[in-house]
Amino acid sequence: MARPFLFLLFLLFLASVTAESSQAQRSRLVGVVVDAHTDLALDRTSVVLEGTRTGTATDRSGRFELALPGEPPYVVVISRVGYDSASLVVESGSAARPLEVRLVPTAVDLPEIFVEQASMTGGLTGLAGIPGSAHYLSPRALERFAHQDIHRILREVPGVNVQDEEGFGLRPHIGIRGTGTERSAKVTIMEDGVPIAPAAYASPSAYFFPAVGRMNGIEVRKGSSQIRYGPITTGGAINLLSTPIPERRSGAVRLLGGTDDNLLLHAWAGDGQGRVSWLLETYRAQTSGFKDLDGGGDTGFDRTEFVGKVRLSSRPGAAVRQSLLVKGVLSDDDSRETYLGLTDADFAASPARRYAGSQEDNIAANQRQLMLRHRIAPSDRLEIITTAYTTFVSRNWYKLDAVRTGAEGNVGIGALVSDPASYPAAYALVTGAPVSASDQLKVKANNREYTTTGLQTEASYRLGIGTLEAGLRLHEDREDRFQWADTWVMDGLAMRLATPGLPGSDANRIDAARAFAAWAQHRLEAGRLTVVPGVRLEFIELTRDDYGKADPDRSGTALASRRNVTEVVVPGIGLAYALREGWTLFGGLHRGFAPPGSTDGTRPESAMDYELGTRVDRGGTRGEIVAFYNDYTNLLGADLTAVGGSGSGDLFNGGSARSYGLEVSGSRNLGHLVGWKVSVPVQVAFSLTRAQFTSSFDSEFEPWGEVHDGDFLAYLPERTLTWSVGVETGRFDLELSGRHAGWMRSTTGTGTPTGQDLIPGHFVLDASADVAVQGGVRLFATVRNVTDAVYVAARRPAGLRPGLPRTFLAGVRATF
């Protein structure tokens, strides 16, 4: 484990050498040129000293190095086709400062990349015009640590709540502003503007999630500004931005390897020139896992994704500009993951242990997605974008569900690990020492298929008094459960299949949804004031056809059907006032909504959400401070095995509740403190979130149990703080990032929790470094959890689960 530290020390030595040598290289100017909207590097950009023939062009990574013929001052002119030129004055003694130049596109219409990705923010420069809380994580932000875990990435965004499960973020738990994190079911999550939940209306739990390691950016919108991105509007919306088709023929490769047989390969190539442009991309991530299975075995995962894009564009100068984008995604995931955690005593002795009774646990999942997006601009004022999409997801999570012993009967794994003293025979069985050879392990095949089809269109019309936007969505999805349970016995530390189950003899049902949605927003601008009123309409029909466990052929002899129809109006309004250039005050209110499921008597989740904040972007400082208050008249709960429930997937009414808090984020380059010998970017994100019930009731859902007015919700730390600091020279970059998470409850209640009701707080430190080798080639290394902190990530689904231990990755990144 000392090797990662030695490597980082070596890189730090290189950094010090680079910093010292920069004193002697003040006759050279280095920097990077990026798109001001997207933060994407701009290659082939001209960098010239005004009034001279001295100049150069940026490389594939947007970087340049220019020899200065004498002593400053100089005027440097940076220019590129399609962008406004920029001029910078280099004063005496400041030539060693690494420059960051942001060029603004000259086009007045929506850039093609934003259409391709269905951007919610319009990139970094678009944030200023949004009358609500919004965040954009740029390509460079995602590159810093090469994270494959969406939890680690979203910790940089205040107000986003995450709960780890297996250490890799493969099936994430994400919430926003106290909505609840259970399988991300309370957040609208999209990739390029298309819902990515396997069945966003019928079954929104994210048992499949795209590989974030291939993403080009991530956007988060909260408050009233996100009502156009339904169906769920209680907390916020997240949009994953895929790799865009490049402007010119180019590509990139990233190859990393590390501890626990970690391997990461990400490569893409494309060409955006001409009327036919394209992109091909592949992503592969694998590891043998960090948990130690009793008797030995792999506890990791293998994931492969392929992405292809083709765009057809109208000829230059056409009277009506059009484009058609076709995107296809193939994804396969094989994870040796389990719901079985550890007892308190076993976690204290060996937190990475995994019981022998989980050796057959595995989830196999695949996704097939096709998207077509058409853009037409009949006039300079009107633009229409129409998207058709279809997705198929199949997954079978084969996992230990319960055990049966002669002495204790049937025992669920949750009860077993929480109270092993009461179930000694069951505990002995899962740890590989059965009391009787006839003791059995019940392993359930949670076999499900999801299909989604949809068509959505949105139009934007520029008026003399602002911009009117409106959209429609037709959507159908369904979840088909066809499950069974096998019986195994333990033979030493090895499991042996005793009795295979009959497919369809466990859950055997189809949940389906048909939805029609319409929305409209009008952006009104009057001097410094911007007002954006909007409304969203949802008509949703949710049905369930349950064929029963005794009818695997689905003859319908015992068919039980149910139907729930919801019609809802979701209004909202956002306001922004420019106090001065680069400083905006904003606020808004809107109705929060989430679909109710097909259970009779279950009402939609409903809330009134308020926010008030300010945003600053001036003088090299970016920041946002927001206070929010969400007042729920009905909070929905979900019966998921992942959170300790029975796994029925049913939604149920949870009564009234409220969540409130404060979000603070900011960034600044502190390079001036060291005389601009290097750049020192610093970022911080702080969240204060409280969520509690405001009514009393007795819930059949075990994680809630008996609820009292004033009880706080579980799995929501009150305080979180994420920070990062970097040292960048252009040739050598070093980044450190820390995450402080306060304690949280594992059950609802009041006061300071203890024992099994408590999940202690923790601190995790990550580090990364890269060094330019030649051209667009850079060596890269990262250490996750540098201090090898041992901490409890969760007590659910069943037992204590550790966070990711110290993990080292190193390799090469290249652009061409």
Image (cartoon, rainbow, N blue to C red):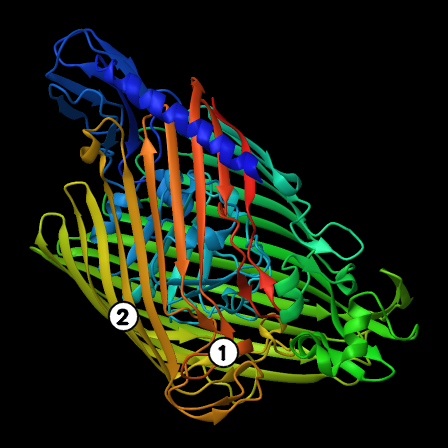
Out of 397 and 497, give the one closest to the viewer. Answer: 497
Out of 581 and 497, give the one closest to the viewer. Answer: 497
| The disc label shown at residue 507, or none | none
Q: CA distance from mark 2 to mark 1?
A: 29 Å
Residue plotted at (61% across, 78% down): 645
Up the image or down, 68 lies above or below 198; here it is above
Number of numbered labels in the structure image:
2
Residue type highlighted by circle 2: Phe
Query: Is tag 2's residue or tag 1's residue first in the polypeptide sequence?
Result: 2
Residue type highlighted by circle 1: Thr
Can you give x and y, in whole percent of width and height, for residue 18 in the image? 34, 21
* Residue of label 1: 754
Residue plotted at (27% across, 70% down): 628
Can you give x and y, in whole percent of width and height, for residue 471 in the image? 36, 60
Label 2 SS: strand
State left or right for residue 15 relative to residue 810: left
Question: Quarter-wise, where is residue 657 in the image?
Answer: bottom left
Question: Quarter-wise, where is residue 574 in the image?
Answer: bottom left
Can you give x and y, in whole percent of width and height, for residue 47 in the image? 24, 18
Up the image or down, 46 lies above or below 593; here it is above
Residue plotted at (36% across, 49% down): 119
- Residues at badges 2 and 1 in contact (C-beta under 8 Å)? no
Q: Residues within 10 Å of mark 2 (few under 14, many from 20)?
A: many
Is residue 603 something that shows in the picture? Answer: yes
Question: Quarter-wise, where is residue 634 in the image?
Answer: bottom left
Can you give x and y, in whole percent of width and height, for residue 12 in the image? 40, 29
State left or right for residue 313 relative to residue 345: left
Question: The N terminus appears in which quarter of the rendering?
Answer: top right
Q: Residues within 10 Å of mark 1 (few under 14, many from 20)?
A: few
Residue plotted at (58% across, 88% down): 700
* Residue of label 2: 628
State left or right for residue 377 relative to residue 175: left
